Image (cartoon, helix red, strand yellow):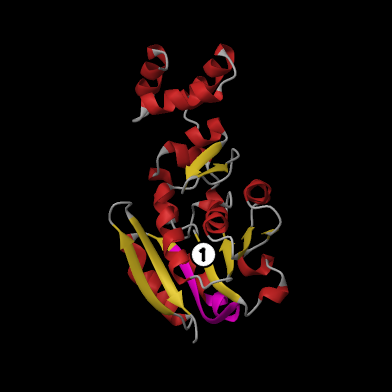
Amino acid sequence: MPPSPIVSSLRSAGCVFAEDEAALLQDAATGPAELERLVARRVGGEPLEYVLGWAAFRGLRVAVDPGVFVPRQRTGFLVEQALEVLPAGGVVVDLCCGSGALGAAVAAERPDATVHAADLDPAAVRCARRNLPGRVHEGDLFAALPPGLRGTVDVVVANVPYVPSEAIASMPPEARDHEPGIALDGGADGLDTLRALAGEAPSWLARGGHVLSETSERQAVGAAAAFAGAGLVPRVERCEDLGATVIIGRGAP
């Protein structure tokens, strides 16, 4: 049982699950001095995942470095939808990969698949290479990938930045003050990166391939229009329990 002063400190700092967080911090600390340091970081507003050095995601402990986007639990629904359309022995690309959590989850759950990942941020690439060794590339969307993948990708999964620029200031401080803006800011309506993803995807997909991205419920209509405009056949899937919305585009048969 974590010491009650630690729980009280975390609760006073606004940590909703103070008891659970205190237990995790206690397990992570090598001694009282380090525990005090970890608690101070958390009370100071750092995301718990940065303090621990990992995030729980679909049964995995995914390494997460400070300054790298923290995978959200709702994004597990994006992985679930990707797995449903992934053929046996398929090729998967995780774009805007951040820590590489999505690619790592697919690789763990479908060891028959060949998984690549890419991100524009060098810090994210370094982190993702810890979680998904061997096939993490640095660069902007599809430009980062080996040219030989063009026309062979069965599933593109992308948790693109989709927060409208003006909404960044109203995000929780954990995200706004600690996570990289490049992983959050999706432009004026939040769909800039998604449009770029949709526009490039068809030439990289194998026949009948799919591209999937997380978005918000209110952006779903615009996201579907972007996919349709790029020649993809769109549909929207939602998970009420997780508060997740996923846009799925099917390529040419």
First to last magenta residue range: 199-213
Describe the element under mark 1 as helix, strand or loop: strand
Of residues 3 and 235, the one nearer the viewer is 3
Can residue 190 be seen? no
Of residues 190 and 49, the one nearer the viewer is 49
- Disc 1: which residue: 157
Which residue type carries mark 1? Val
Q: How many marks?
A: 1
Image position of 191 with respect to 105: above or below: below
Q: Which residue is drawn at 53% across and 76% down?
A: 199
Image position of 162 with respect to 169: above or below: below
Of residues 25 and 226, the one nearer the viewer is 25
Classify the position of the N terminus by image quarter. top left
Of residues 220 and 207, the one nearer the viewer is 207
Q: Please give left or right for residue 90 compared with residue 231 in the image.
A: right
Residue 248, given in percent of the width and then of the height, sits at 42, 71
Can residue 155 be seen? yes
Q: Is the magenta stretch mostly helix, strand or loop?
A: strand
Q: Picture quarter containing residue 78?
A: bottom left
Q: Is residue 171 magenta?
A: no
Q: Please give left or right for residue 178 compared with residue 248 in the image.
A: right
Residue 130, given in percent of the width and then of the height, sits at 66, 46
Classed neighbour count for the residue bearing mark 1: other residues with Cα under 10 Å, few (<14), some (14–19), many (≥20): many
Residue 202, given in percent of the width and then of the height, sits at 55, 80
Q: Which residue is drawn at 47% across and 27% down?
A: 24
Q: Residue at x 59, y 38 (%)?
A: 66
Farthest-out residue, bottom: 253
Q: Does the magenta stretch include residue 202?
A: yes
